Image (spheres, helix red, strand yellow):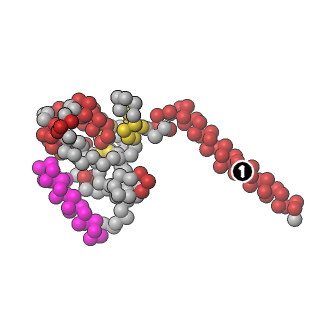
Amino acid sequence: MLAQVRPAIVSTVFFTLLLGVGYPLAVTGIAQLAFPAKAGGSLVRDASGGVVGSRLIAQGFDAPRYLHPRPSAAGKGYDAAGSSGSNLGPLSDDLIARETEGAAAYRAATGQGAVPADAVTASASGLDPEVSPANAALQARRIAAARGVSVAQVEQVIAAHTTGRVFGILGQPRVNVLEVNLGLDARFPVPPAAR
């Protein structure tokens, strides 16, 4: 029996070390060398070098001077530790009520009748860092009024942080909310008293 158990134990230890330790370390090392920013979480830093967020994870912005992200069902909202969708089906009364309430609030905030789907629906992770260009464009007037600048100036910042389709054909154009908000703060700072 020892002749059969020993090779099984040796194989288990060998493959655990190879595939459970060696392979992940090798992949992590290659990623750190080839794509250091992405491997480090795509962190965004302020002028002093402090981390203010990640290009990959949404944050809750609700002040009128900021571009607002998609709603989040993650934890208590935008909680990366509780990443998840709501799991509510299309016929759920709770989902219908939440989206109806969200659409009314969006119309009130933007003064527009149109409501893009991503303005009232959470993503599968609840942490989608991007909104559609249509959603961003409809928020431009509110942002401009809150910052005391023209809508065209806000649209320029939004356009600067809009990414097109991958390879020109895959996915949809999208606007990174954190990058737009940092761009707005850099270009049109709000006095501390107005915050």
What predominant SS class does the magenta segment belong to? helix
What residue lies at 55% left-to-right and 31% top-to-bottom?
33
Q: Where is residue 125 in the image (x, y as percent from the top left)?
A: 39, 54
Position in image of residue 83 (x %, y %) = 41, 55
Label 1 Cα crowd, 10 Å radius (few <14 / some 14-19 / many 20+)? few
- Position of residue 120 in the picture relative to residue 55 (left or right): left
Say whether residue 127 is left or right of residue 189: right
Number of marks in the rendered image: 1
Does 115 sit above or below residue 180? below
Which portion, as a residue range, is magenta?
92-115
Residue 46, compared with residue 169, is above or below; it is above
Identify residue for label 1.
Answer: 15
Amino acid under disc 1: Phe
Residue drawn 29% across and 35% down? 182
Image position of 47 (left or right of 115): right
Quadrant showing the N terminus: bottom right
Residue 81 in magenta?
no
Residue 155 placement: quadrant? top left
Mark 1 secondary-structure assignment: helix
Reply yes or no: does residue 112 show up in magenta. Answer: yes
Q: Position of residue 56 (x, y in %)?
A: 40, 43
Quarter-wise, where is residue 27 in the image? Answer: top right
Residue that appears at 29% across and 57% down: 121
Q: Can residue 155 be seen in this view?
A: no
Residue 82, visible in the rendered structure: yes
Task: Quarter of the image for the C terminus: give it.
Answer: top left
Work out whether 112 lies above or below 51: below
Residue at point 37%, 29% (across, down): 48
Residue 166 position in % (x across, y down): 38, 39
